[in-house]
Image: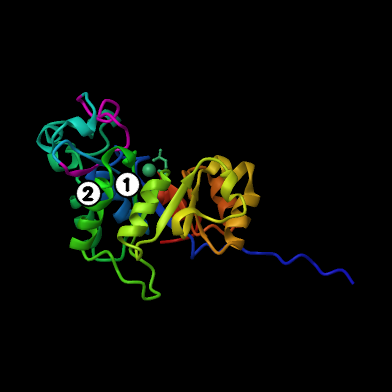
Amino acid sequence: RVHPTPVVLPNRAATQVVAHRGASGTFAEHTLAAYKLAVDQGADALECDVRLTADGHLVCVHDRTVDRTSNGRGVVSTLELAQLSELDFGSWKGDPVDWTDTEHTAVLTLERLLELATDCGRRVELAIETKHPTRYAGLVERKLLELLHRFDLVTPSSGERSPVRIMSFSQLSLRRVRELAPAVPTVFLTERVPLRFRDGSLPHGAKIAGPGIELVRENPGYVAALHRAGHRVHVWTVDDPEDVELCLRLGVEAVITNHPRQVLDQLGRQ
Ligand code: G3P
Ligand code: CA
């Protein structure tokens, strides 16, 4: 007797929609305006990249330098917060909002982003990526966790899902977070199937894998391996509707997108 293959229906309601650098398809990435829009649009979580300034503040900037995303030049880690605060991080992307409100164009500190997320009237999770943390001998992770503690975001493992997760391409960073705060879930980011972990296992107690969408397209079996190993899968950066459908078919737990509203619409979400 032939058993029909069970049809697995994508669970549209359960898939988290994460705003990548805010609603960065619309407003300049990592600006307060981009994050406020993502919150207003109904994103479940906010993704951001963090770097240390010369005077030890965590700011949300993707690149090593400010050249692409501001009207200034220079390496983030060599500039002080006051110097970064003089720059305009908004207007390079056209003029979709009123950028005369300098709070929207100023460099965004992680502290300000946490204020927004914890004070917006509903649960909005955070997916925070440490960028090139190897340089600072653990300072990025220590400062980050200090700040998360201050906002009461490091919850003891009570079975309830953590409101925050820390992501990195750097295994060293994941290890440090695990040592400093085992209650905070970590996300192992990767652009290729890691040889050592091709069975779906993850390094340093990471609970979640963050494969890039190209990898998922080329190797959907890796997602299945991750799931078999009991891990959650958060895919980036998923903007194309066909990629969203692929992620749903594979049952991924979160899609990280520059266009949160568009993806929420595709999922039939409010
Ligand atoms: O969410 C993970 C993703 O953001 C990693 O790539 O270059 O956009 O930081 P990148
Ligand atoms: Ca990122």
Q: CA distance from mark 2 to mark 1?
A: 9 Å
Q: Position of residue 155 (x, y in %)?
A: 30, 69
Q: Position of residue 244 (x, y in %)?
A: 54, 50
SS at mark 1? Answer: strand
Looking at the picture, does residue 189 appear above or below residue 252?
Answer: above
Asked if ligand 2 lies within 8 A of label 1, the reply is: yes
Q: Give, as a single range, the part of the protein colored magenta.
A: 56-72
Image quadrant for the C terminus? Answer: bottom left
Drawn side of residue 105 relative to residue 8, left or right: left
As drawn, is 94 to the left or to the right of 240? Answer: left
Query: Is label 2 in contact with label 1 (beta carbons under 8 Å)?
Result: yes
- Percent across and percent down for residue 112 are 18, 51
Give residue 40's quadrant in the image.
bottom left
Name which residue lies at 32% across and 33% down: 63
Tag 1: residue type? Cys
Q: Give the color scheme: rainbow, by chain, secondary structure or one colour.
A: rainbow
In the image, 177 versus 190, the foreground residue is 177
Q: For residue 225, which quarter of the picture?
A: bottom right
Report if residue 170 lies within the magenta region: no
Residue 60 placement (x, y as % from top left):
26, 42
Q: Which mark is residue 110?
A: 2
Relative placement, left or right, of 160 versus 50 is right
Residue that numbered label 1 is attached to: 48
Magenta stretch: includes residue 67: yes
The response on whether ligand 2 sits within 8 Å of label 2 is no
Looking at the picture, does residue 53 appear above or below residue 6?
Answer: above
Mark toward the start of the polypeptide (2 vs 1): 1
For image coordinates 30% across by 39% down, the residue present is 27
In this view, which residue lies farthest toward the left? 82
